[in-house]
Amino acid sequence: MYIDPGNEKPIFLQIAEQLEDSIFTGLYSEEEKIPSTNEISSLFHINPHTVLKGMNLLVDDGVIYKKRGLGMYVAKGAVEKIRAKRQNLFYDQYIATLIDEAKKLQLSKEQIVKLIERGYDNESNSNQ
């Protein structure tokens, strides 16, 4: 995890995003315990309430849950919930913006698809 105190994004959101990403990429598996509020606050020298606020966002999303007296654990289906959330964000942040700009440029749907395919082709060639 990496927390940037100089980032304009609130620390509790950075914590939630970092934990979510760790779960999504498999660092923490379903039903596995994640670091405690105190462990994270000690590691980054931040207030435990700030950490808890970030964790509570993931609890509200059903990504993690609390086992009384034992700590926080990754919920079953957490990866799929995160994937669905990120797919929706991907549409909102990238696709809707792309379509809006394409309309301004008077690009057709077919032209957009060709540009995307060109991007994938270039990515494939650079990975070889």
Image (spheres, grey):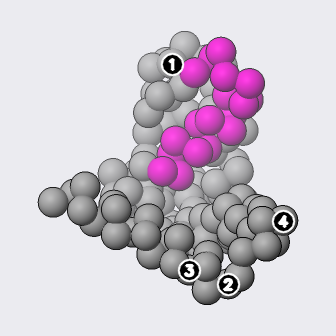
- Residue at label 4? 104
* Dot in front, 3 or 1: 3
Instruction: Report the side of 99 relative to 44 (left or right).
Output: right
Give the distance between the C-alpha atoms of the residues marked 2 and 1, in whole angstroms.
47 Å
> Is 109 contained in the magenta span?
no
Mark 1 surroundings within 10 Å by alpha-carbon count, few (fewer than 14), some (14 through 19), many (20 or more): some
Instruction: Report the side of 97 relative to 3 (left or right).
Output: right
Residue 109 numbered mark, or none: 2
Marks 3 and 1, the one that precedes in the sequence:
1
The residue at the far left in this view is: 128
* Amino acid type, mark 2: Lys
The reply to whether residue 70 is in sight is no
Q: Quadrant of the C terminus?
A: bottom left
- Residue at label 3? 113
- Residue at label 1? 44
**Segment colored magenta:** 4-21
Marks 2 and 1, the one that precedes in the sequence:
1
